[in-house]
Image: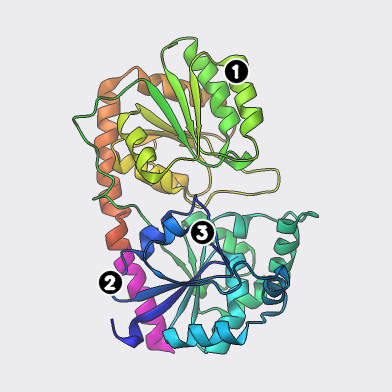
Amino acid sequence: MQSQDQMIIFRNELLNYSETFIPAQVNLLSKYQPCYVGTKVLNTQLLGNSQVIAPLDGKSKLYRLLFMLAGYTLPTWLTRVKKVNPKLIHAHFGVDGVFALPLAKKLQIPLVVTFHGYDITVDDCDNSLSGWMHRLYKIRRQLLFKQSNTCIAVSKFIRSKLIEKGCPEDKILVHYIGVDVEKFTPNPDIKRTPVVLFVGRLVEKKGCEYLIKAMSQVQSVLPDLELVVIGDGELRSSLEKQARECLTRYRFLGSQSPDVVKNWMNQALLLAAPSVTSVKKDSEGLPICILEAQAMGLPVVASHHAGIPEAIIHGETGFLAAERDWQTLGEHILTLASNSTLRESFAAEGRLHMEREFNLKLNTKKLEAIYDSILNQT
């Protein structure tokens, strides 16, 4: 790659286990050579063989605080980043966009920020560190809107939230990340088993408690239908307790690798994604697992929430229920679990929908066209 093709992928912490969508997109870049930049490395496996610059990892918390509060960058860090000769910074999540602003200014290069969900939906402030960081983000968010070159919304819903928070409409582009439809392809030799699959962090907005209620209703009719929960989080203990009290067949598998998740998607009957708006107004952007499931020929029963209706066509590729309406959620699960013909129809239509609108390879080319346009204007 030539030097003019170099770019930075910025995430303050590289990367949370649930953020597989970032390297999935990065790994398909063809015109730009990415370098991950952040202050701390969390997961080397997700970063793969990409170049990584995280000079504050393992150092005093003071350096990280100085960077987040005042944009202070160690001279050695700035020197290493300059040697990459980046032409553009792409920050994931609005909070990280705020942190990346000073770096973009020092490098005198454009800043692109992708907003994924909580970073533009949450209004809550609390006394925790995350609450402190969010308050700082809220103070500087208008500056981010003003000084960033482009704000990417992962769904039309997120676009509407950006506008509500004061982002100029002409700076917003809706861009679906998508799913690798070549990687996520069902193996017809694997037999489907009576499993309802849930994949996601065990936090309030994922709505797993409503799925457990729905499955209690479902298992009174179909006792052999099992709930398999993949993911971890602060609510795991309470959710396991709830499941023990009302379900006969269930498993909590904790966090699993992408390959394990894919295998479960290949053998389950359907995926449930009962997302809700949390009490802190935290919402989804567009859950990638919904896209992966449909690419795998797995019908989805989900909530009519945030960007989900943009990916699921009710009655054609899946079913939608109102948030927290576990009775309707259960009815949809029963309908699909009891009707193999309908499941096959939804599976085929869902796969086509992913190929046409949510193809990661094609959508990443569109992202690179966005980069090209920004650089041509600067």
**What's the distance in space between the residues labelled 3 and 2, CA to CA?**
22 Å
What is the quadrant of residue 8 in the picture?
Answer: bottom left
> Quick check: marks 3 and 1 in contact, CB under 8 Å?
no
Indicate the position of residue 137 as horizontal and vertical percent values: 68, 67
Residue 37 lies left or right of residue 85; in this view the side is right
Q: Is residue 46 above or below residue 338?
A: below
Tell me the residue that label 1 is attached to.
Answer: 244
Q: Nearer the viewer, residue 288 or 84?
A: 84
Tell me the residue that label 3 is attached to.
Answer: 15
**Span colored in magenta:** 364-378
**What's the distance in space between the residues labelled 1 and 2, CA to CA?**
49 Å
Indicate the position of residue 112 as horizontal and vertical percent values: 49, 74
Residue depicted at 26% across the width and 49% down the height: 183
Residue depicted at 50% across the width and 51% down the height: 17
Q: Earlier in the sequence, mark 3 or mark 2?
A: 3
What is the quadrant of residue 31 in the picture?
Answer: bottom left
Tell me the residue that label 2 is attached to.
Answer: 30
> Quick check: marks 3 and 2 in contact, CB under 8 Å?
no
Residue 223 lies left or right of residue 204; in this view the side is left
Q: Nearer the viewer, residue 116 or 10?
A: 10
Q: Is residue 49 above or below residue 314?
A: below
Please, what is the three-letter code of the amino acid marked with disc 1?
Arg
